[in-house]
Image (cartoon, rainbow, N blue to C red):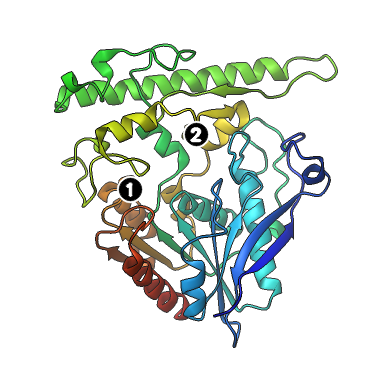
Amino acid sequence: MPKLKLAVIDVKPGAALESQSGLQMMRPRIYGAWMAPPGPKKVAAIVMHPASNFMGHYLIEPLAARGVACMGLNSRYAGNDTLLLMERVIQDLGAGVQFLRAQGYDKVVLIGNSGGASLSALYQAQAERLTIERMLDGDPAGLSPADLPPVDGLALCAAHEGRSTLMRNWIDPSLTDEHDALSVDTSLDMYDPRNQPFTPEFLARFKAAQHARLARIEEGVTWRLAMLRGMTAPGSARDEVFAIYRTHADPRCLDLSMDANDRQLGSVWANGAAGARSVNYAASQMGRLTSLTAFLSQWSSQSRADGPSNLTTTSVPVLLCTYTADQSTFPSTRDAWLRAGAERIRHVNIAGGNHYLAGQPGLVTQVADEMAAWMKAL
C-alpha cells in the first residue's frame, strides 16, 4: 500500500482578515492528504468539502488500493465556515486540480461527497464557462479561467443539493426571536408531540413559515450589508457576524413515510427524535455563526452553489452513488441530481448506506469498487 503524503498548496489571498493567522494571511495555503499508487498515472481524484476536514476521508486508501490516486483536500475554511465564500472555495479546489495535473495524471475526477457534491458541480460549471465576475456583495471575485482547470468527471455520493437547499429545508420556523435561541411558537414546533403525527395542514404551515423566516433573515442581511458599505469613515466595517439559531428542523427526521428510504429515525448526527432535537438546539450547528457575505454565498436564495442547477450546465460524465439509508439525502434529492445529469449520469444504489458509511466497511468497499471501475473507464 502506498504511503499517505501531505500536499501543501499555495492559493490566492482572499478577503482581508479572513483568517486570524498572520502566517496564513501573508502566504495562504491549503492542505491535502493523498495516496498515489505505483504504475502509470492514468487517473487521480480529489474529494473535498467546503468546510469539513477530508484529509482522513474513507475513500482515500481504498481508491489508491484500486489504482486511483486520491487526495482528501481541505479548503482554507476547513473547520470554520463563518466567513466561507463558495466562490473562494472553488478557487482552492482549482489549486488542487492544478496540483494533480502537475503530477502528470492523464485525468482528474472530483468526488462530491455530502456537501462536496454541490461544490464539485459549481466548480465544473465555472471551469467550463466562467460567469462569476463579482461576489454577491459586489466585490470583485478575482476568478480567472486559469484558476479553474476543467476536470474529466464528477463522482457524487451521499450528495446534498447545496447549502442553501439544506438551510431552506432545515431551518426551524418555530423560533420567534432571532436573538433568543429558546423562543418558540409551539404551534410550529415539529418536536412538540402535540403536533405529531404531522398533518398536511401542519406541514403546509411549517413550510410557509420556514420560507418566511429565511426571507426575513435574508432581507435583514441585505439591509445591514448596504448600511455597512455606506459608511465612509476610514476603517469602517465592511462585514459582520451574526447567529442563526435552530437550523435542524426537517420533518423527514421524524416521519419516515415522507420521502421514504431506508433511514432510521433522527438525524445524521444523532439518532431518534430527541437526538435530532438536540442537534437543532446545539451551540455549534449548520450555519450557526455566519458573516453577512458568507450567508449570501452559502445559505441564501442568491447562492450560486445549487448542485443540480450547476450540473445541468456541465458536459462531463457523472456517477451518482445513492446511500439508501441516508438521513439527509432522500429520493427527491436523488431525483434532482438524476434530472440534472440526464443521459450523462450513471446511478448506483448503495443499499443500506448511512450518510457517512459509519460502521459499514463492506459498503465502503462497494463504493470504492464502483468509483474505481467508473474512473478507469473514462
The three-letter amino acid code for the residue at tag 1 is Thr
- Left or right: residue 106 versus residue 288 is right
Q: Quadrant of residue 296?
A: top right
- Left or right: residue 288 versus residue 18 is left
Residue at 33%, 62% in the rendered image:
360
Front residue of this view, candidates 340 and 174? 174
What is the CA distance from the residue labelled 2 to the residue labelled 1? Answer: 17 Å
Residue that carries the numbered disc 1 in the rendered image:
329
Q: Quadrant of residue 194?
A: top left
Residue at 25%, 33% in the rendered image:
273
CA neighbours of label 2 inside 10 A, class few (<14), some (14 to 19), many (20+): many
Residue that carries the numbered disc 2 in the rendered image:
299
- Left or right: residue 275 versus residue 242 is left
CA neighbours of label 1 inside 10 A, class few (<14), some (14 to 19), many (20+): many
Q: From what the image shows, is residue 51 above or below residue 202?
A: below
Q: From what the image shows, is residue 239 above or below residue 135?
A: above
